Amino acid sequence: MCTFITIRGFRNIATSSILTLFSVGHVAIAQTTAMPKLAVILNSGEASVSLIDMPSRQVIKTIPVGKEPHHLMMTPDEKTLLIANAAGNDVVLMNPSTGELTGRIPNIIDPYQIGYSPNHKWFVANGNRLDRVDIYAANGADLKLAKTVKLAKTPSHIAFTADSKTAFITLQDSSELAAIDLETQSVLWVMPTGKVPAGLWMTPGDQYLLVGITGDDYVQVIDWKTRKEVKRIPTGKGAHNFRPLGDKKHVFVSNRIASSISLINMQTLEKVGDITGLPAGPDDMEITPDGKTLWVTLRFAKKVGVIDIPSMKLMTVIPVGKSPHGVFFYPRASWE
């Protein structure tokens, strides 16, 4: 199986233009020769996790973890993987290298999307089902609830300012973006966005917020300091979630309805490429530490896709459980 990239109107698989586009990025992100062995896939529709042996690209084990595991996050010490069970109201602890379950944090209510602030002081859990955002004082996996912030409707994804002062939350069903002051746990402002905003990504220097507009076909660029839309970058229907390439210049966005992944230049705010022809529902993404391989969950197809980044070919798909959402392995390419 293969897929194609479109750059500036030309369709090709392995042109010198594509290789040039990524050559500088690969120098920047190939920081280690160590490669991950185990991929963790959250099957949100089956209350389980699939463990994939990455060299053979085979599922070696499926583990029950709890109801509706959607998103995951590594603890700041990079020793424990947190798996958030939205309907199970808890967070499961996993050894990211072996896949062994090592514990559980109870009474984390409706944790759909989770994230640590850059200074690791705060842990934010978006309650997608209950229209709430819970903010915890964090010491690794030791979490103490500071405040519950009610928001409407359907808090989805999270982004932070580099100074850890502000958290931004997309509100899917009210088509809004909220900003929360983390020190006071109070809402600073709420502004309208396009239809069904989901994924969030902050461009370098905290200049702009990129918002995946899942109810339409574009990424909305917002100057969060003035609360104004700067631009709309057409990508594909169901623009949803982000994963930076790791070169501090490019970011991928998955288009769930179009079954494609677009590449955006964060400096020019232009789309520079499209990976098309993917199985249905590309969603969360992860990149190997050498910067050469992109893994993506294919939520509607019950599969995981493995894409060669330099050639932009879909190399293989791996069957997993129902509605695969989060994907994780370690080590991985930089998230900057």
Image (cartoon, rainbow, N blue to C red):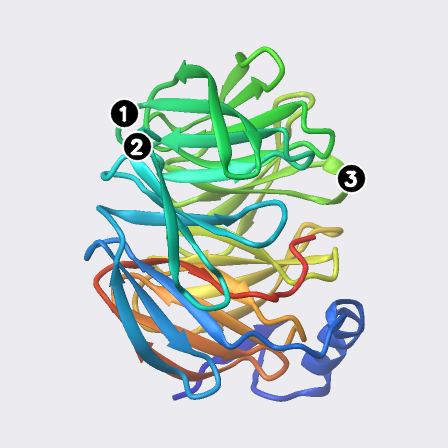
Local crowd size for mark 3, using a 10 Å CA cut-off: few (<14), some (14–19), many (≥20): few
Please, what secondary structure does the residue beneath circle 3 have? Answer: helix
Q: Are marks 1 and 2 in contact (CB under 8 Å)?
A: yes
Q: Tell me how far mark 2 sits from mark 3, CA to CA.
A: 32 Å
Between 303 and 257, the one nearer to me in the picture: 303
Local crowd size for mark 2, using a 10 Å CA cut-off: few (<14), some (14–19), many (≥20): many
Task: Give the percent coordinates (x, y) of residue 97.
Answer: 50, 67
Amino acid at circle 3: Gly
Examine the image and state in which quarter residue 317 appears.
Answer: bottom left
Res. 277 visible in picture = no
Which residue position is annotated with label 2?
Answer: 110
- Quick check: 236 left or right of 286? left
Q: Which tag, 3 or 1, sits closer to the chain's start? A: 1
Residue located 41% across and 16% down the image: 148
Amino acid at circle 2: Asp
Eye-nearest disc, 1 or 2: 2
Which residue position is annotated with label 3?
Answer: 205
Please, what secondary structure does the residue beneath circle 2 have? Answer: loop
Indicate the quadrant containing the N terminus: top left, top right, bottom left or bottom right: bottom left
Query: Compared to 26, does 332 lie above or below?
Result: above
Task: Give the percent coordinates (x, y) of residue 290.
Answer: 67, 75
Q: Which tag, 1 or 2, sits closer to the chain's start? A: 2
Task: Give the percent coordinates (x, y) of residue 130.
Answer: 27, 25
Between 102 and 321, the one nearer to me in the picture: 102
Which residue position is annotated with label 1?
Answer: 130
